């Protein structure tokens, strides 16, 4: 049996459980997320000698903590910016094609996982070339109740390409649609 390990070794921040990332580090990651989103090109870049898989995988590792912080803060504007316009999103409510089809449904998911007094954690994250696999869970800070969990695979061509395929299995235990009071806390793109 393989020895268990911390998946955040060699990443800039550890989102495997609550309380490991300071607000100052989180602020820096939000700034970095905005910069990373600005690097996305209109045409999916080719994988070649000037943009090899090794660079793409390293960029995905650099991006990962920014994604976690954006989710914890309900920054739907940043999260939407991580997707390519031709995104394919496969999940139990999908499939969704393009970045408009899933917007209405996904904002409910973001509102539930980013609500006050709930912390989203990603105990497992793995990288292989342009693939990022992770498992997540949301914990009620007061009761320690599990309110949701899931596993996701992103196919993300680094900073220049962004995410063009996302597959997800999500399960919510307490809520499935967010009330307006939570939806209003999600930052949207203008």
Image (cartoon, rainbow, N blue to C red):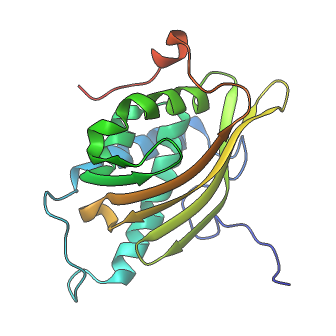
Horizontal side, residue 141 vs residue 110: left or right: right
Horizontal side, residue 144 vs residue 40: left or right: right
Q: Residue at x 55, y 13 (%)?
A: 179
Residue 95, horizontal then vertical, whole percent: 41, 49
Q: Residue at x 34, y 34 (%)?
A: 77
Residue 67, horizontal then vertical, whole percent: 47, 48
Horizontal side, residue 42 vs residue 130: left or right: left
Q: Residue at x 38, y 82 (%)?
A: 54
Residue 36, can we see it?
A: no
Placement of 37 over or under 128, stated as above or below: above
Residue 54, can we see it?
A: yes
Residue 39, horizontal then vertical, whole percent: 22, 56
The quarter of the image holding the N terminus is bottom right
Residue 14, horizontal then vertical, whole percent: 64, 55
Count the marks: 0
Give the quadrant of residue 151: bottom right
| Towards the viewer: 86 or 39 | 86
Query: In the displayed image of the protein, which residue is found farthest to the top?
Result: 181
Placement of 106 over or under 81, stated as above or below: above
Horizontal side, residue 17 vs residue 90: left or right: right
| Towards the viewer: 73 or 85 | 85
Give the quadrant of residue 53: bottom left
Query: In the displayed image of the protein, which residue is found farthest to the left?
Result: 42
Placement of 89 over or under 104, stated as above or below: below
The quarter of the image holding the C terminus is top left
Placement of 62 over or under 128, stated as above or below: above
């Amino acid at each position: 049996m393989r020895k268990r390990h911390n998946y955040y070794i060699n990443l800039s921040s550890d989102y495997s459980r609550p309380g490991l990332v300071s607000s100052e580090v989180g602020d820096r990651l939000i700034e970095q997320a905005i910069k990373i989103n600005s690097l996305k090109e209109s045409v999916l870049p080719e994988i070649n000698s000037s943009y090899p898989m090794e660079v793409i995988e390293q960029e995905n590792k650099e991006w990962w903590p920014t994604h976690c912080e954006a989710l914890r803060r309900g920054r739907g504007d940043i999260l939407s910016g991580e997707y390519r316009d031709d995104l394919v999103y496969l999940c139990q409510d999908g499939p969704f094609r393009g970045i408009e089809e899933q917007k209405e449904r996904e904002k409910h998911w973001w509102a539930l996982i980013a609500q006050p007094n709930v912390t989203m954690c990603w105990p497992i994250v793995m990288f292989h070339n342009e693939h990022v696999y992770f498992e997540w869970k949301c914990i009620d800070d007061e009761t320690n109740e599990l309110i949701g969990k899931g596993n996701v695979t992103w196919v993300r061509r680094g900073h220049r390409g962004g995410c063009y395929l996302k597959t997800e299995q999500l399960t919510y235990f307490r809520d499935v649609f967010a009330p307006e009071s939570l939806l209003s806390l999600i930052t949207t793109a203008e």
